[in-house]
Amino acid sequence: MIRNPCYIEDGTFIDPYDYTPYLANISLPVTIFNSILLALIVISYIPQLVKMYRTRSVYSISFIFLHVASYSLLFSTSVFYITTLPQIFACPQNPGLCYSNMIPFLQSSAFLLGFIWWYALTIRLLYVSKVKTNHATSSEAEPTSDQGDVQRAKCHVLAFFLFLGVMLSIIAAATVIVIFYGMCTPWVRGFTLALSITSLFFNLAQFSPQIYHTCKVKSPGSMSVLLSSIQFIVVLCMFVFAIISKANWMTYLTMTSSTVQLFVLTVALIIYTFRDRRKKSKNDNSEDKELMVQNPDIGDRTDECDSDSNEVGKQSGVSMSSKVI
């Protein structure tokens, strides 16, 4: 059992090893609503991952967006983790209230873990397409002109592993801090507030690089419209719920920023997706017309084949009728 460091400061605790006062009674409709949002968060990453596995391309994905968004989600999840740890310690003592209290932390964790999977897959595809291909096609005596792209790919790989190191360090530090000092210590609250403000600043610029890159290349590329659409709906619902529940002011700023940026990104992806499909259909039609112009006898040959088949059908019909007679 873990002793509560805030047992003396808080008079609501009778047993220093009892964490159940941290658990709140949450109504069933709220639990169901949050569970639906949690499921949508998990589902939202599936179209993006499927599209990238199928195309094996990272075209139109902004790596600045990946790096900024990873730290935005990390700091946000860290705040949820620190504030939820006492409730996690209370789960074995009162399992009935555990899940409903864990949902906000599970939602934030689902955003982070799904993004890490996407982040890792993007880095892997970039590394395979740039580094391994370059080593396979070039020799030491004849360096290729893609060395700059190779170095950038390696830098992105290092940035990804640096992010993983920072994430593990924050998780370890947060666990030790809450176990030995609790949430009642002023400097722990200040540390949590600093993480919240840092997450807010990262969130304000989270989707801006991807919006700029999408508008620059004028194509959705490897970005999934379903991912952006589902996450926009989820964030919008969470924003409305935060207003109803009168959440912290930083939650308002974060949700407002995410909602507006996701809306702009979703609209841009939808517009460029329809534009690409229209261009593709026009190109297909123009190619068919060019083939007809270059080979005008194709239609005549088709008509001749049809007439020959009709004559064969008539002759076979006559022969069959003569046999019957």
Image (cartoon, rainbow, N blue to C red):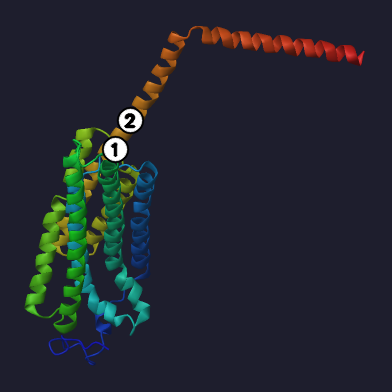
Q: Is residue 231 above or below residue 187?
A: above
Q: In this view, does 91 lie above or below 297?
A: below
Q: Please provide percent x and percent y for residue 267.
A: 27, 39
Q: Which mark is residue 220?
A: 1
Task: Say left or right for 3 vs 325.
Answer: left
Does residue 50 appear anywhere in the picture? Answer: yes
User: In the image, what residue occupies the spot 28% across and 64% down?
Assistant: 109
The residue sitting at the bottom extreme is 15
Q: Taking the image as drawn, is residue 247 in sight?
A: no
In the depicted view, which residue is nearer to us: 156 or 189?
Answer: 156
What amino acid does circle 1 point to? Pro
Question: Which numbered disc, 2 or 1, marks the residue that appears first in the sequence?
Answer: 1
Q: Which of 19 and 111 is in front in this view?
A: 111
Quadrant in which residue 83 is drawn: bottom left
Location of the C terminus (image quadrant): top right
Identify the secondary structure beneath mark 1: loop
Q: Nearer the viewer, residue 304 or 125?
A: 125
Q: Quadrant of residue 26?
A: bottom left
Residue 234's x, y, as percent?
Answer: 30, 54
Q: According to the image, label 2 marks what residue?
A: 276
**Which mark identifies residue 166?**
none
